[in-house]
Image: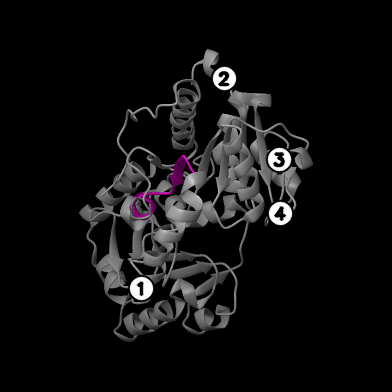
């Protein structure tokens, strides 16, 4: 954005605004200053932690299905970003923006599953929500496919919604020097495919394969992981997780369902290889034949075996490939997309015509 373009009022409403979301938006917030307002509902981190990460204050929104801007003590913005369409308080704010001729951007993290629910959902979206949405931000290629299925026109959907903080998650040593062959990070629940991970570890070790694997997280399946000889570490601050990633060759994520998987971006920033299930949305953006292996949901054993058999040359080439793919996401990408949407919204405001986007949507593989 050029200095002279910073004329529109902007607001971003993020349900349960996470720490990484605040870090993603920080450059934009710094650039716009008082012209941007950040609205959030309570999340895992305290408002004070989020404000420190964001470099600005936030407004906590009530869960009111008829929420209005004057209840927040704010003017109606010209450009409004909000997470999803399932939150009635944000939808209410969006309707006010549209009635005033403003631009609304929906931030959607779902993936295209080609199931009956989404086949029905596309008609509901087109009838009920599409009139209230001008642009959409999605994490990556799968979200782009979903929005096309739901009827969003070409040029209205942008990738780059999610990304980890590259200041925290930095490149580790060569993979051959890392102590752990595999690392899992996430909730210890069945949806993450952990029963299959436990079975894979037991199978490979029963066949005489020697390797180290650790898991960071918490949940009801902790005992299952420990019984399989998997080192278990409690959730820790991001810096501690980053150190573990820098000491692991592969992130393993055999999820049954996983919308995108921020942890995958954290791992690629750290230079890790990947073992991902097809259900992990980020596999289409961050996994290639040069930095990892794909598996069926909840069935990681074959891919883990391939990873363990990778030779020194493959491991050496894996790290820069992960680094290359990771570079397409993060605060810089978020700022680029924000700038493109801002320019398009400004054009809509002054001409009423939707301009053509200047760059193609990024689809990594």
- For residue 6, which numbered disc appears in the image? 2
Q: Secondary structure at mark 1?
A: loop
Task: First in sequence, mark 3 or 4: give its number.
Answer: 4
Q: Does residue 302 appear left or right of residue 341 in this picture?
A: left
* Residue 163 seen in the figure: no
Q: Are marks 4 and 2 in contact (CB under 8 Å)?
A: no
Residue pointed to by mark 3: 51
* Residue 34 seen in the figure: yes
Per the image, is 146 magenta? Answer: yes
Label 3 CA crowd tier, 10 Å (few <14, some 14–19, many 20+):
some
The colour scheme used here is: one colour
In this view, the residue in front, 115 or 274, is 115
Residue pointed to by mark 4: 42
Q: Which residues are magenta?
A: 133-147
Task: First in sequence, mark 1 or 4: give its number.
Answer: 4
Q: Residue furthest top?
A: 4
Q: Secondary structure at mark 3?
A: helix
Seen at 46% across and 39% down, the residue is 134
Q: How many marks?
A: 4
* Residue 305 position by quadrant: bottom left
Between marks 3 and 2, how big is the CA–CA gap? Answer: 22 Å
Per the image, is 290 magenta? Answer: no
Between marks 1 and 4, how big is the CA–CA gap? Answer: 32 Å
Residue pointed to by mark 1: 297
Between marks 1 and 2, how big is the CA–CA gap? Answer: 46 Å
Seen at 44% across and 28% down, the residue is 344
Nearest to viewer (mark 4 / mark 2): 2
Q: How far across and how far down the image is residue 138, in percent?
A: 44, 48
In this view, the residue in front, 241 or 312, is 241
């Amino acid at each position: 954005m050029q200095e002279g373009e910073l004329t529109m009022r902007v607001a971003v409403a993020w349900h349960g605004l996470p720490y990484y979301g605040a870090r993603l938006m920080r450059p934009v917030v710094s650039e716009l200053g008082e012209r941007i307002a950040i609205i959030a509902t309570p999340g895992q981190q305290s408002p004070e932690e989020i404000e420190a990460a964001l470099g600005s204050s936030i407004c906590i929104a009530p869960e009111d299905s008829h929420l209005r801007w004057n209840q927040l003590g704010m003017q109606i913005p010209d450009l409004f970003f909000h997470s999803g369409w399932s939150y009635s308080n944000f939808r209410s704010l969006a309707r006010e923006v549209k009635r005033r001729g403003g631009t609304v951007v929906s931030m959607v993290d779902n993936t295209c599953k080609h199931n009956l629910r989404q086949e029905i959902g596309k008609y509901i979206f087109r009838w009920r929500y599409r009139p209230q949405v001008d642009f959409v931000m999605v994490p990556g290629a799968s979200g782009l496919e979903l929005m096309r299925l739901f009827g969003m026109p070409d040029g209205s959907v942008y990738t780059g919604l999610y990304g980890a903080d590259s200041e925290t998650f930095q490149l580790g040593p060569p993979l051959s020097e890392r102590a752990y062959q595999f690392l899992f990070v996430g909730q210890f629940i069945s949806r993450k495919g952990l029963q299959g991970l436990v079975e894979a570890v037991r199978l490979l070790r029963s066949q005489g394969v020697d390797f180290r694997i650790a898991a960071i997280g918490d949940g009801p399946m902790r005992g299952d992981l420990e019984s399989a000889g998997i080192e278990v570490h409690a959730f820790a601050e991001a810096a501690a997780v980053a150190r573990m990633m820098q000491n692991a060759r592969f992130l393993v994520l055999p999820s049954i369902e996983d919308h995108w998987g921020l942890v995958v971006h954290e791992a690629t920033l750290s230079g890790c290889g990947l073992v991902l299930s097809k259900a992990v949305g980020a596999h289409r953006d961050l996994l290639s034949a040069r930095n990892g292996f794909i598996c069926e949901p909840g069935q990681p054993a074959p891919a883990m075996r391939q990873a363990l058999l990778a030779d020194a040359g493959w491991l050496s080439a894996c790290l820069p490939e992960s680094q290359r793919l990771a570079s397409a996401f993060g605060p810089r990408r978020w700022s680029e997309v924000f700038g493109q949407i801002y320019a398009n919204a400004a054009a809509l405001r002054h001409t009423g015509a939707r301009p053509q986007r200047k760059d193609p949507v990024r689809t990594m593989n």
